[in-house]
């Protein structure tokens, strides 16, 4: 895999983790799944390594949601 596809994949995973972590109804389910299944070991490592970027995306999403008009687009990324 070349440099750019890896970068795109990294950014998409960061965005996805930020969305999941930013949704209270999914956050606990995701945490439980990550800690109970060995399949998530690499994802946990990725999240730890990229925590600052994930938090930046979550902060951006929250700020965007706070400024969106009532019944906005509903888009989390973007």
Image (cartoon, grey):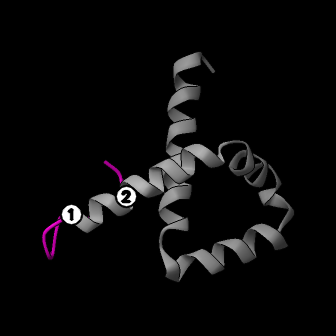
**Residue 67 in the figure: left or right of residue 37:** left
**Residue 14 spot, x, y in % from top left:** 55, 47
Residue situated in front as seen by the camera: 3 or 66 = 66
- Residue 26 can be seen in this image: yes
- Residue 75 can be seen in this image: no
Say if 68 sits above or below 9 in the image.
below
Can you name the residue that lies furthest to the right here? Answer: 38
Identify the element where label 1 is drawn: helix
Mark 1 vs 2: CB contact within 8 A: no
Q: Magenta: predominant secondary structure element?
A: loop
Residue visible at 54% across and 53% down in the picture: 55
**Residue 43 in the figure: left or right of residue 52:** right
Identify the element where label 2 is drawn: helix
In the image, is residue 76 part of the stretch drawn in magenta?
yes
Going from N to C along the chain, the mark reached first, 1 or 2, is: 2
Per the image, the residue denoted by label 1 is 67
Q: Nearer the viewer, mark 1 or mark 2?
A: 1
**Residue 12 in the figure: left or right of residue 52:** left
Mark drawn on residue 21: none
**Residue 61 spot, x, y in % from top left:** 37, 58
Say if 11 sits above or below 26 in the image.
above
Residue visible at 83% across and 68% down in the picture: 37
**Residue 9 spot, x, y in % from top left:** 55, 36
How far is disc 1 from disc 2 in space, using C-alphas?
A: 10 Å
Per the image, the residue denoted by label 2 is 61
Residue visible at 51% across and 79% down in the picture: 24
Instruction: Please tell me in which quadrant of the rendered image residue 73 appears.
Output: bottom left
Instruction: Please tell me in which quadrant of the rendered image residue 49 appears.
Output: top right
Where are the magenta residues, as a range?
A: 68-78
Q: Looking at the rendering, in which quadrant would you find the N terminus?
A: top right
């Amino acid at each position: 895999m070349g440099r750019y596809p890896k970068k795109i994949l990294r950014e998409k995973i960061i965005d996805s983790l930020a969305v999941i972590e930013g949704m209270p109804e999914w956050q606990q389910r995701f945490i439980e799944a990550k800690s109970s299944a060995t399949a998530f070991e690499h994802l946990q490592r990725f999240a730890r390594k990229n925590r600052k970027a994930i938090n930046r995306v979550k902060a951006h999403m929250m700020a965007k949601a706070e400024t969106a008009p009532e019944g906005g687009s509903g888009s989390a990324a973007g």
